[in-house]
Image (tube, coloured by chain):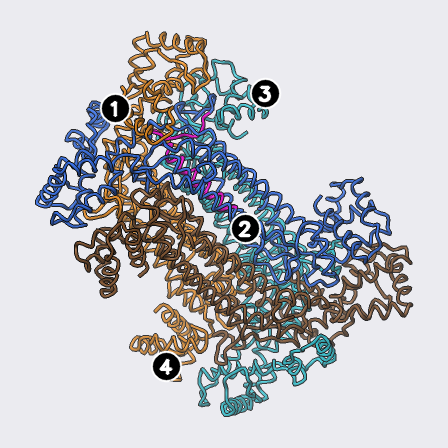
Chain colours: A blue, B cyan, C orange, D brown
Amino acid sequence: MAWQKVELAVIAAYEEMKLIPLGPHLTIEKNWSENPIDLEWWKKRDVEIHHDLNAFLDERLRFLPDYLHKYVHKNITSYDTEEPAFHRMLLSATECVNVYYDSLIDVMIRQANTYRYTIMMARTHGQEAELQSFGARILTWIVDLRQAYSGVELAQRNLHYCKLSGAIGKYGDMNPEIERLSLSILGFEPFHGATQIIPRTLQVPLAQSLMNLAMVIDKIGNDIRLSARSGRPLMQEPFGKKQKGSSAMPQKKNPIRTEQLEGMARMAKGFCDMIVGGIRTWEERSIEQSSVERIAWPDLFHVLCQALSVTRNVMDNLKVYPDNMLEEVYLARGVYASSAVKEFFKSRLEISELNYEDVYRIVQLACFNVFEPSADRLEIRNYRPSSMRMAEIQLSSLSALQQPKVISIKDFLPAANLRITDALDVCQEEVERYNRFLSSIFQDEKNLTAWQQIFSPSFLLRNEDLLFFKILPSVNE
Amino acid sequence: MAWQKVELAVIAAYEEMKLIPLGPHLTIEKNWSENPIDLEWWKKRDVEIHHDLNAFLDERLRFLPDYLHKYVHKNITSYDTEEPAFHRMLLSATECVNVYYDSLIDVMIRQANTYRYTIMMARTHGQEAELQSFGARILTWIVDLRQAYSGVELAQRNLHYCKLSGAIGKYGDMNPEIERLSLSILGFEPFHGATQIIPRTLQVPLAQSLMNLAMVIDKIGNDIRLSARSGRPLMQEPFGKKQKGSSAMPQKKNPIRTEQLEGMARMAKGFCDMIVGGIRTWEERSIEQSSVERIAWPDLFHVLCQALSVTRNVMDNLKVYPDNMLEEVYLARGVYASSAVKEFFKSRLEISELNYEDVYRIVQLACFNVFEPSADRLEIRNYRPSSMRMAEIQLSSLSALQQPKVISIKDFLPAANLRITDALDVCQEEVERYNRFLSSIFQDEKNLTAWQQIFSPSFLLRNEDLLFFKILPSVNE
Amino acid sequence: MAWQKVELAVIAAYEEMKLIPLGPHLTIEKNWSENPIDLEWWKKRDVEIHHDLNAFLDERLRFLPDYLHKYVHKNITSYDTEEPAFHRMLLSATECVNVYYDSLIDVMIRQANTYRYTIMMARTHGQEAELQSFGARILTWIVDLRQAYSGVELAQRNLHYCKLSGAIGKYGDMNPEIERLSLSILGFEPFHGATQIIPRTLQVPLAQSLMNLAMVIDKIGNDIRLSARSGRPLMQEPFGKKQKGSSAMPQKKNPIRTEQLEGMARMAKGFCDMIVGGIRTWEERSIEQSSVERIAWPDLFHVLCQALSVTRNVMDNLKVYPDNMLEEVYLARGVYASSAVKEFFKSRLEISELNYEDVYRIVQLACFNVFEPSADRLEIRNYRPSSMRMAEIQLSSLSALQQPKVISIKDFLPAANLRITDALDVCQEEVERYNRFLSSIFQDEKNLTAWQQIFSPSFLLRNEDLLFFKILPSVNE
Amino acid sequence: MAWQKVELAVIAAYEEMKLIPLGPHLTIEKNWSENPIDLEWWKKRDVEIHHDLNAFLDERLRFLPDYLHKYVHKNITSYDTEEPAFHRMLLSATECVNVYYDSLIDVMIRQANTYRYTIMMARTHGQEAELQSFGARILTWIVDLRQAYSGVELAQRNLHYCKLSGAIGKYGDMNPEIERLSLSILGFEPFHGATQIIPRTLQVPLAQSLMNLAMVIDKIGNDIRLSARSGRPLMQEPFGKKQKGSSAMPQKKNPIRTEQLEGMARMAKGFCDMIVGGIRTWEERSIEQSSVERIAWPDLFHVLCQALSVTRNVMDNLKVYPDNMLEEVYLARGVYASSAVKEFFKSRLEISELNYEDVYRIVQLACFNVFEPSADRLEIRNYRPSSMRMAEIQLSSLSALQQPKVISIKDFLPAANLRITDALDVCQEEVERYNRFLSSIFQDEKNLTAWQQIFSPSFLLRNEDLLFFKILPSVNE
């Protein structure tokens, strides 16, 4: 029992300072360890006197001869007992978080290395952007977790300070040296300037950094959910062999674990908000923060450990579909290289009358062109059926369509065959100017060789090694 | 078990519509009522298939002959079962709140009437303002509670709608008439346009209005705490005869109950915030809201019922000190009538060269004058001791001071003895002009009589009756 | 100027009650309308006296002859002027919201009808579930908006009450009849039981319901973003012909509008939270809520109107790709009918030894079977390249793969060719039993005909008409 | 313009690495500094292309000859430009906060020293507890501010990292060495593992620690408000000589500044919450955080600087009334020494049959006894008038009461005159036992001398020096 430890430490400190005779500390410790706390008695007493710590002391004093009573809780106030016990509990709980966190990071690192060369589309705004390896995406998750966790570590340091400075923190009857010694026995240093309690500014950053950690987990869970959308899922959380996805729809594999991560982050935010309010207590303290802290702190730790554990489990058993990732790449028609393409053209502008802006528009136009649907498909796209019957015909037409040929801008641009499109504000004359430019570039064999090069993953991802080396140095040296 | 009721209602609806033969409903109901749910079996099954409702159904089906299986959970999805059960629970919990609320309001009304003529200072900005009865302050608490509670009642109405419209809410295999009938058996009307779940916009207002109620309680608790500050407490929450206020300071009567009300409101806010996030679920639903709702809703109701119950207890046994209230009034030196005083002078301005602004400054000056400390006291006020020794002398001097005579502006102003003060920007000449004005006014005996009148509580509180009549009509007719 | 109107209404009320002579009201109104407020003068005065309303009165009194001064602000306190003006502003702002809201709903209804027969996959948990029309999804958005907006309308009603009951709300020098008349001139009824201010419980529900509306908009925006993910986008927000998606990647069409909706909801939540805190003001009021409300209310309205307007614009010009929607349906291989399939088998169980649970597993197995990749593809799926070179080979292999034949469970199940799979816990013997059951069912021609039927959209969506009729009655009768 | 600086730094880096010829950097810098940004042009362009950074580049390129265009924004993406500029702004704003903070702390330290020997009652739960100096209370404010501010300093360190790693943060076309050099020119180090943007986990702790600082300020403001309650105010915020407290009540000195501090903290919390949500952005980023951050960050800084500045002003000009503080001490009747009194008795228990618990009850009883009202006053206290007339009589009776003699427990306990009271569960027999104990103690002259001692401030506050020395070492050595 944490309170008992604090009471004993204070008695030991008095003895060490020779302010009381040697002896009571050991006797009391012995008596108490032989007589564990009677919770029923304690609760009953608390109902009577409405003061949990006084009730606790009354319970404990039952097991001591009268002459020892005066050494117990000597010159201190309830919160001199409670605060060190509380900080001790926060530190223990944080160590639990640390265990879950370390275990998650280990799995993350393993998976980052496993998928170091598994290629996928990166997405910004939900839109396909450039190429990356899945391992490199996991790296961004790892650094985000680390960043959030570094806040937990910083916040933890505050908790190595505590107080034993009496009812208003001014050491009324308390010898500051007794505070120093007692806290030192308990592993703390004194915080000077407390009121009856430690200022909550020492504790709140821990709640906030735990919440931030929960939000990073939420972000990771959300990314997995976004990649797990059926049709062409890139990855899925594990699904038990006997698991049922839905009572109505047997085909479902619902990402319930990663969805719950969002719920857990929302709860962590709620619990954190409750705790933050404690900073604003009246004068030398009032007790509104206490009722909140007794609920919100344990629940916050609980939800966070659960979130870390679920994430670890999901990451450990993540089902990854590289074929679908690559299919996405293949169907992206080379536009992931658009940035390199732009630079390719910019460095060859001298020979033409075109400018920087033209290059942008050429690449944009090519990207739009290669995704233009066939006439058949366009007809389906533009059709709005006015009855269910017509809708069924539309569905049949679509099902009957041939899969279109997939043309990459890698092949499309050298053909110098840009064409106008409704989607962009470009006129025929400009397009012709662009095509002339393209023709002139690609007549040069040297250019064509260089061109091939810029679409290859080994070129596009050439700098990912640096990230692995910087972020996972031990395994990537 | 709420889920079971829903399943049975659906079967009954099918029978009523003659879509299945008559009979299964009664047989199943009988079997199930004879075989209560085996929670252990259910939980074990849930661990296996990761789907609580499917596990529940598997457990229930154990007690039915095979030929009845097809009638159970027919054409519906898990949330067709869960949502009506959930709304039913929200409604029950709200009824609990209602009981606590009614009981609190009853006590409040009783106390408002008890203190209908107990006079106290009203305070704005924590500063003494005008006179009021304590009963009238309780009226302001009552209307605030009522206003918040009316939100609960409005929000409750949303919960009389529910859904049984299948996996995506489009009645895939579900006959809308079956929905209507089943819901009607359960006491609901169909909500058209649900997805797999009822839109959380139907539920969120309940959480918000419960939180608002918690915040009104917090406001009331805070007002009591402000009045309970020792020195000259106006009221105090009940304090048990064996209660201990502090382990270190036996003199303490801590307002722990009203302080906890602040903590409870903070928790209610946290739980409400968790629930609100559920509005934003993906497409036809994802499950992140579910984990949150299972924790936040019960905890929100729990904390609110506790807050209502504590407040009721505090109000019921509130210790009120009318002597201290009146002492505050007495020591306020009549400034509580300043508004009436101002009007008194404004209506007598014609005979002078003074204006509206001058009247304001006259009253302000008088109020400042009557509170000016004696020279002795001023000396103590302005002294900043430079050692503890000097501080002790300062304390002795103060203790030795005679209590100053209490002069009300009621007597002060007719004496026409305004004087300049450092605290206001007013010059000697102005003061003399003001005093001339006062002299001329108070030479008139009629004015003096009218003047006496405006300081009496029966004049100042003459309109409170209206409030009692409007707010508590039944008892004040 | 709203304050001026309130001051004038009070004077008019005094005249009407014949408590002052007839006349001042008109004279003052004339003088003031001829002399607009000098903002500079006012501000300067405010800096001097630190009281905005008193400074305002000083400014206004400059334009009145002395004899009229006494009629202005007679017996009332600052907040008697400010609260009606404030409620007036809240009501006006809410009317603005109403205009934006109506306009959005109009567009929504138009689009719901446009896409009444445009078929798409519904998604729960981000996973393909059953079929729906896009119009029907829009219906779920409409009812969610309506539900949230109904909260705004309810909350608005509170604002038709106001107060003119003096410095502490007890009608010190104020005649309650004057309050009634003045408020009636301004369009309000008196709220009995105010303190210096109207209890914030009357205003907070408006902030909360506005926030709820913002969250529904966020939900809609999020749904659009989820459907706009590139690869096979189902819809996209409008993209200008000259718009640039990204400075680096010209191919990008970023859904910046719908993304901003999430940001706006987050802001609305923040502003609402600020306002909610105002419920808890000290005693007869303190002023901490005022500074907050002056910022948070206008910003909340502003962000909400902007969110409504952006959503309207997005919905109005939404690019919809029915071909991609249908392709998703086609590629879903009939699993969207799984619920109907399950019922189909359940109603034909009598002839076999199988039970409810077996039917679930048959359908689950068929759904998993039809999505099993080819051996070639499986090889790619299971390969984890260990270098970039190998990754490039993997990509080439994938690009070279033939598109697999798309087999629907509609054709797969009658073939009675279920096979075991690693993903489910099912043994060869069970599978054979299942296949025997399927064979026996589908030998019956009648069954086969019924079977074909249950996959057709007109069957699966047969109940959507009801939703259109219930939700959009006027246009669907 | 911050963006321009980043663009120039990148060009300089390219030159330094000799990847482009020497020269462009200086030429471009010259052209741009000669041609300031045309905001109108920029805005117009932004409306057209919906991309603020691209519009900015278009504006800037106008002033460069075509041949230089290719060096601008080379291989980088918008957020490579925006993130360093953003971190630069956050750092500058934090430096502003630092200036306000330092200035506030200076004033706080000065006032702590000024009031080092000004004695007042400490309050826990709003109840008078033990003695302290007002200086020592200010110390607790100082350490709370410092603690919160230390969080700001820690959070600031995160902002010395930034990114220039391209559209998805994987250095697609960006040379990592160019990132390192450009950032170094701008004063940053690279953050490895960014996506398109820096993870918001680097920025969020700054928002949180700023909010924490605002909450400490709120706590201080609240403490001042609690001490400023009229009747016997201990301190008040400055009140201008021409200031008006209320339009209706000229006597009012409203603590509007400290009240606004609460409002500002509430706003800071709202803005912080908006920012926190940004952690959860989609995949390699989406843009919902951007719209939020552009509003919430500046507003958060603004509100915080304002709060610090107001607090500084209030503290600098705080009106302190030591006479009222001492009167409170005097009227507290020695109970502030109860803890020392308890220890006094506990160390003299041996000679008696009493125990620890008895001592507690003796002191509690004495404290209750000395505050018992006179019979006259008790009569007033227990009277509940049933009409206004009776209320006026009650007020007159109270006004006519003699001030009771103030008896301290210092004199009361030696008289051994404890008596039973309704408020505590104690019987006559016990009281007599207690009185016998007291008599025996105080017969001993030595005890009486020791007794006198424990009530003196120099004894009770003997340990405050330590706090001044530890917390303000430089001035207290």
**Quadrant of res C404:** top left
Residue D390 included in the magenta stretch of the image: no
- The chain ID associated with circle 4 is C
Question: Which residue is identified by label 3?
Answer: B34
Nearest to the observer: residue A163 or residue B363: A163
Q: Position of residue D454 (x, y in %)?
A: 79, 68
Crowd rating for badge 4 (residues with CA inside 10 Å; few <14, some 14–19, many 20+): few
Question: Are tags 3 and 4 found on a single chain?
Answer: no
Q: Amino acid at mark 3?
A: Glu
Question: Which residue is identified by label 2?
Answer: A154
- The residue shown at (30%, 21%) is C455
- The chain ID associated with circle 1 is C
CA gap, disc 3 and disc 4: 87 Å
Q: Position of residue B139 (x, y in %)?
A: 56, 60
Look at the image and give the residue range highlighted in magenta. A210-239
Q: Position of residue B2 (x, y in %)?
A: 52, 30
Asked whether residue B91 appears in the rendered view, the answer is yes
Asked whether residue C261 appears in the rendered view, the answer is no
The relative height of residue C271 versus residue A456 in the rendered view (above or below) is below
Q: Amino acid at mark 2?
A: Leu
Q: For numbered disc 3, what is the local secondary structure? A: helix
Q: Amino acid at mark 4?
A: Arg
Nearest to the observer: residue B312 or residue A67: A67
